[in-house]
Image: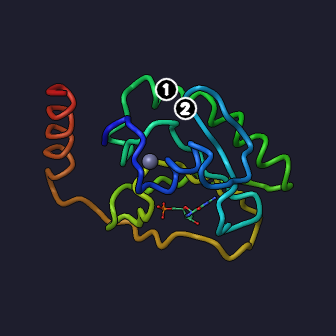
Amino acid sequence: MTGDAMTDCLFCKIIAGDLPCHRVYLDENVLAFLDIGPVSSGHVLVIPNHHYETLSDLPDELSAAIGSVLPRLCRAVIESVGAKGLNVLQNNGACAGQVVNHAHFHLIPRIEDDGLGFRWRAGKYDNGEAERLCGKISNALANQ
Ligand code: 5GP
Ligand code: ZN
């Protein structure tokens, strides 16, 4: 989490032009390019043009800049590959699957029965747990 370019960061090198990429979008805050190992054809990565490790580290303005371009990028990707849907995936931290420590959003186009998916095991809150959690998260937000 810095905002400064990091010399050992792959995505900072791509931003600096020291590593090539297949760029699909660039503005003063945001870069989007094809993932080198696409989960599906048209898999795009959207990154802030400054180095922050995770979504939690992003300043509001940078996060807003990404948010404002995401719908356009989604539409363009869906249209270009003829997808029927799209997942936005955003990994934070190694335990959540983040490998490149420069915040990024995955845009993954989907079609019916493409075999992709997420192991989603829905749980259930015990009595009172949801209320307790709700209070904790609301307090944490109020203290930021
Ligand atoms: P993560 O697991 O960190 O959420 O995802 C990192 C993504 O970056 C992976 O999907 C991987 O294929 C992609 N990636 C890693 N190195 C490069 C690279 O040099 N160029 C491009 N275009 N994508 C990369
Ligand atoms: Zn970086």
The C terminus sits in image quarter? top left
User: Which type of secondary structure does the marked residue at label 2 adopt?
Assistant: helix
Q: Amino acid at mark 1?
A: Ala
Residue 132 screen position, x and y as percent:
13, 45
- Determine the residue positioned at 51% across, 38% down: 48
Quadrant of ligand 1: it is: bottom right
Q: Which residue is mark 2?
A: 67
In the image, residue 21 above or below residue 65: below
The N terminus sits in image quarter? top left
Quadrant of res 9:
bottom left
Do tag 2 and tag 1 residues touch (Cβ < 8 Å)?
A: yes
- Determine the residue positioned at 16% across, 52% down: 129
Total count of labels: 2
On whether ligand 1 comes within 8 Å of the CB at mark 2, the answer is: no
Residue 20 screen position, x and y as percent:
67, 54
29 left or right of 122 in image:
right
Residue 64: mark in rendering: 1
78 left or right of 54 in image:
right
Q: Amino acid at mark 2?
A: Gly
The front one of 36 and 125 is: 36
In the image, residue 101 above or below residue 118: above
Separation of marks 2 and 1 at Cα, in angstroms:
5 Å
